[in-house]
Structures are given as C-alpha cells and as structure tokens.
Image (cartoon, rainbow, N blue to C red):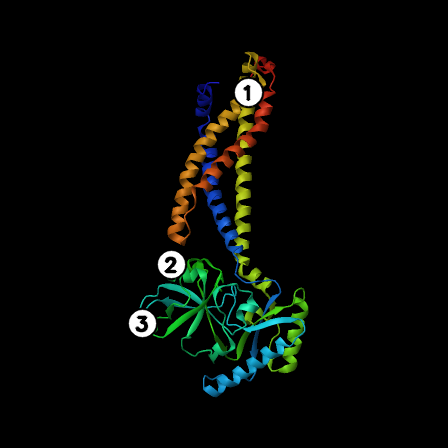
Amino acid sequence: MTLHPILAALKKHKAGVTLITLQIALTLAIVCNAVFIIGQRVDRVNRPTGLDEQNLFLIQQAYVGAPSGDDAESVQKLDAMQRSDLETLRGLPDVESVAAISSLPLLQSSWTGGVGLKPDQQHSTEHAAYYFGDDQMLKTLGLQLVAGRNFTASDITNRGFRGVGQPAMIIVTKALGDKLFPKGDALGKTVYLDGQAIPSTIIGIVKRMQIPASGSWGNSFAWNSVLQPIRLNSSYTRTAVRAKPGRLDAAMREAREALFKANPMRVLEDQPNIGVGIMPFSEIRARAYRADIGMAVLMGVICLILLCVTAAGIVGLTSFWVGQRRKQIGIRRALGATRNDILRYFQTENLMIAGVGVLLGAILAVGLNLWMMKQFAMDRMSLLYVLVGVVALLMLGQSAVFAPARRASRVSPVEATRSV
C-alpha cells in the first residue's frame, strides 16, 4: 500500500485531521502527567511509617480545671496526673503497653527543628521532626532498634509544654543518621539541636519512623526523626497504646471507661475537630491520606473521560469519512481491492494521524511537567510515562478505528455503479 492516496485524502479533510490530531496530543499530555501524579500519590499512601500499626491506638485528651502555668509546681502536678493515667492504662487486661507521646506519624501535628554537627551552628545540617516520649515509646510503637539501646526509665525527664532545653541523649532514625554521618557510624556521635551549644549524644538508631506530616512539603525529610526522652506536661496529652493481639476494640472501650473512672474531669469524647478522642492508627492513616486518595481518584476519572472522548472522536470521524467515501471504496473493491486492503487503509490512515498527534503530545507532556515543576515544585516526570502513553494512545487509536474500518471493508463493489 502506498501512502500517496492516504495523504491525498487527508488533505481534503484538513479541519477534521487537525482537530483529531490536537485532541490526541492534548489527551497524551494531560494523561501522562495525570498518571504521574497518581503514581506519586499512590507511592505516598503506601509509604511505611516504621510503626507496627496493628493493634495501635491513640488517646488525645484535655484535663478540665488543670494548671495552665509553666511554673515548677504546675508542671509537676500535670506530670503526676499524666503518670497516673499511664499507670491506669497499663493495668487494663487488654492493653499490652502504653507510652506518653507528643505525636505520631501521619498525625499532622509536629515539632520540627534543625540538627547540626557543631555548637551554635547557624544553618542546620538536616531538618528533622521531634518526638517526645518516655522509655516505652519503642515498645508501644513497634519501632525496630537496629543499633544502640533504648531509653531507660532513669533517662526520662519531664518539662512543661512551653519549656526549653536540649536532651543529653537522643535516638534517631537510620535515614537521619546516615545523612548526618555518611560513613554509617552515627551511633555514639554528638549532635546539636536547633542551633544550640548543648550536645546530644545518639544512643540508639531505629530502622524507620516517618514524620507526622504527610504532605509534599515534608518529602525532603520524610524519614528524619529524632526521639527525645522527655515527657511533656500540659493540660492536653497524647498517649499511644498497644492492645493485645485482636483486642483493639475492647482495649479502646476499657481505656475510655478506666480514665473517666480515675478522673472524670477531662474531655475525651471523640471530637476530631478539636483533637480529642480515642482512635485506632488505621483511622489516623485514612485521614492523613484522604486528600491524596481523592486526588488519585479524580485524576483517574479525568484520564478515563479523556481517553473515552478521544476514542469516540476517532470512531466518529472515521465513520463520517467512511460514509463520504462509500463510492470510492466500492470502486476500489471493483478494481480488485480485498476487504483486508480496505481495513489496512483506514488503520494506516489513523496511524499516521495518531503518530503526528502523539509526537506533539509527547512534547506537550514534557513541557507541562516542566511548567508544573516550576509552579508547584513537582518532581520531574520519567520519560517512561511518555513512552507508555504514546504506545497506549496508538493502540487506542487502532482499536477505535477498527469498527468503522471493518464496516468500510464490507462495502460491496456494486456501490461503484450507483449514481451520486
């Protein structure tokens, strides 16, 4: 089959060819970037937190009538109330372990700061999230210690929520330790938090612990976490609780009843809008990634609509051309063209149109990604997305044109004898 008849026919339908070419180009550009965004969202949702999430739940509560000052007496009274609650929870039959905690991965509430290698360092070496808690943090959260040791009860100090001071010892994630000390010898090294001159010694390294933030702004330090042996005291507390296997719901009910029985002067009823209540970690994860999942679904729907519209456009345009060319097709059949010849003709014609469209679309896809990188700080899209998109659009075009091309191949040679 020569291309000259195809090109001659396309020149007579410039408007239709131009429109379908642009439609294919725009579809490719948008779909490639949308699929790339979906991939990023899926990767983010599937990131491991480093916790043993099963049977883990969080208690957030506020004391009523508790001291609100930062003086030593108020702080110690708040600490006594918090320790009393911890002991109450540890005594429940369906509870395995309990830890005072300042936040959890994906909770969207965090303390962050800089970690430096020198005292009074103006620009920190790495940015990190801080977790404050007691010696039961690692056990309760299910963190995996890969080097060094855990905090002991004697290492734990307490201070007011607005108190200041740097801990003598810390535990860091392996990701942060390797960034600070690329040789892999972070254990036992001294670092300085928040540009201060007070040294903190790394006594332990955990395999992984994600920061509380799940948004894109935290991607650059998603695994940089510092655990500090400090129990924060205020009228608002957070407590991580690990239930015994299979006893999560029972432990959550027991915890609520036991805490109110020990001290009814507290706000503990589920009110997510003000950050109080009892919730399993699975709910924390679901809330953290609700927007990402919604974005992925929206992008998926947009891709599906665009592909369907493009396929419909190809079918409609080809069907229109078949209707216009019935006499010419009949003449070709009368001159000896087979059904397969007619079928290949329309498929080749579509392939040429789609080829130009995907070429323009590939350029637009890369350009759109570069623009979004500049405007929204997105990552660079791999060219693999574009290549897969090109193949997919070409296959879509061939599939869409098959039905009208097959109808064209069934045109009888007698059509050539009919008058216009």
Taking the view exactly as shown, the residue that stands out farthest to the bottom is 73
Measured in 3D between alpha carbons, the distance from the residue under mark 3 to the one under mark 1, in whole angstroms, is 79 Å
Q: Which residue is mark 2?
A: 183
Q: Residue 40, can we see it?
A: yes
Query: In the rendered view, would you say 149 is above or below 343?
Result: below
Badge 3: residue crowd in 10 Å (few <14, some 14–19, many ≥20) = some
In this view, the mark in front (2 or 1):
2
- The foreground one among 52 and 358 is 52
Q: Which residue is mark 3?
A: 120
The picture places residue 333, in percent across and down from the top left corner, at 56, 15
Measured in 3D between alpha carbons, the distance from the residue under mark 2 to the one under mark 1, in whole angstroms, is 68 Å
Task: Please identify the quarter of the rendering in which residue 197 is found.
Answer: bottom left
Which amino acid, mark 3? Asp
In terms of secondary structure, where does tag 2 sit?
A: loop
Q: Earlier in the sequence, mark 2 or mark 1?
A: 2
- The foreground one among 354 and 256 is 256
